[in-house]
Amino acid sequence: MATERPDGHRGRGARLRGAAALAARWLWHYRVRSGLAVAGITVAVVLAITLGSVGHGVTANGGQAIELINRDLWATTGSVALRPGGVGGVANPVQNAHERTAAFEATEGVSDADALGFNAVYVSDTPSDFETIVGVGVTGSATEANMEAGTAFGTVDLHYGSGDYDGPMTRELLIDRRTAERFDVGVGDELYVGGTIATAEQQSFEVVGITSTFSRFLGAPTVTLHLSELQTVVGTTGTDPAAVIAITTPQDASTDRVQRRLERRFPEFSVRTNDEQVRAITGRQSTLLVAAGLLVLLAIVTSVLLTANVAALLVQQQRESLAAALATGMRPLTLAVAVVVQGALLGLTGAVLGCLLALPMIAGVNAVVGTLTGFGDLLLAPPWLYLLGSGLAVGFGVLGSLTGAYLVLRLEPVRVLSRH
């Protein structure tokens, strides 16, 4: 073990280099325990980055999805819920959607309002081999959609008529890019769509446009129909259900004022701005995010305890040699710094490994989710998230090493050496 000259002429830089060399020697000597500490820190970093990317992805994608629809306010009477065993598979909370949408649109300060409904439907390019895809129903002409090919609907929702669903069915269909690739269809081709396979075999629709707007809004492959036509093929015309009413206000109107007006006129509805709708989307993930946060916290505590254990064992097992070094003139502060540097090196190693492992993990999860849903950016990890994870890792190591540094500063060379 290196010693420090009693006259103390060694410079501060040399002292730090000596402390770093000593810390590296300790890490190699206790490489099994050091490896466990690094593993703990690595796991904490991977969890922090990966789960942090989930929260960031939900928030960012939620905001992007809302922006894609290009509306100002969102009104609904509840959350969209799964309806196992029912045709369509989804319970849409807004009833009498066409009448409610017309009432919203007739309100002062509203320039446009459209209802959106969501249902699981069977889709195929032939009257067989059906797959389940999310069906989107809209009352308007879907001109807000960003078209990649073809056009939006040529008309608004005509089939609803005066409420008897006796108007003509346009049989127009918008699909997203993944649905187009899955069935190898494009503008002008036909797809069979229905709430049951028996219904789908008899209901064909012409693809008039390709857009990913609604698929990104929902995070899944979609086919988009006029709302009344979707209700007809899934058998929900009796209650005229929809999930949400999307509202546009004039550019010179106060969105907050229109929101308050709608809330007074329609007290059974929750009317949200874009920001509030994004928070509502992320709020539904609160249980998952809280659980993820607790998992990260557990990993952090574990990594700190592992590092503290390595530092404490080092001091305990090297008491005699540390005491001898102090007795020959090495400053206690130099040894304490070496212990802290050891912790920082453990943290830095864990940070590097954690970042390297997080990259393919995030890419893998996004690839799987993209394959299953067509939405490949569920996890978003910006550079600052990696920097944050790395900073936390070094902090874990330093924090854990403080126990050993404290024990070094408390070491009494005369008492320790007199026992041997």
Image: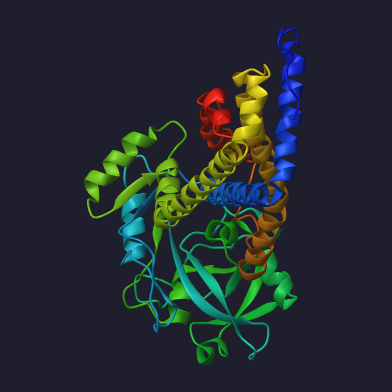
Q: Residue at x 33, y 39 (%)?
A: 258
| In this picture, residue 239 sits left or right of residue 116 | left
Q: Is residue 211 visible to us here?
A: no
Reply above or below: 253 against 116.
above
Residue 175, percent across and down?
A: 63, 67
Q: Residue at x 74, y 43 (%)?
A: 28
Numbered circles on residues, count = 0
Q: Residue at x 51, y 88 (%)?
A: 199
In the image, 82 versus 96, the foreground residue is: 82
Residue 26, percent across and down?
A: 70, 38
Reply above or below: 111 against 257.
below
Q: Quadrant of residue 319?
A: top right
Reply above or below: 87 against 161.
below
In the image, 276 versus 329, the foreground residue is: 329
Q: Quadrant of the N terminus?
A: top right
Residue 367, percent across and down?
A: 69, 63
| In this picture, residue 224 sits left or right of residue 293 | right
In the image, 110 versus 382, the foreground residue is: 382
Q: Residue at x 63, y 30 (%)?
A: 322
Q: Quadrant of the C terminus?
A: top right
Reply above or below: 359 against 189.
above
Q: Quadrant of residue 327?
A: top right
Residue 323, percent across and down?
A: 61, 27
Q: Is residue 259 visible to us here?
A: yes
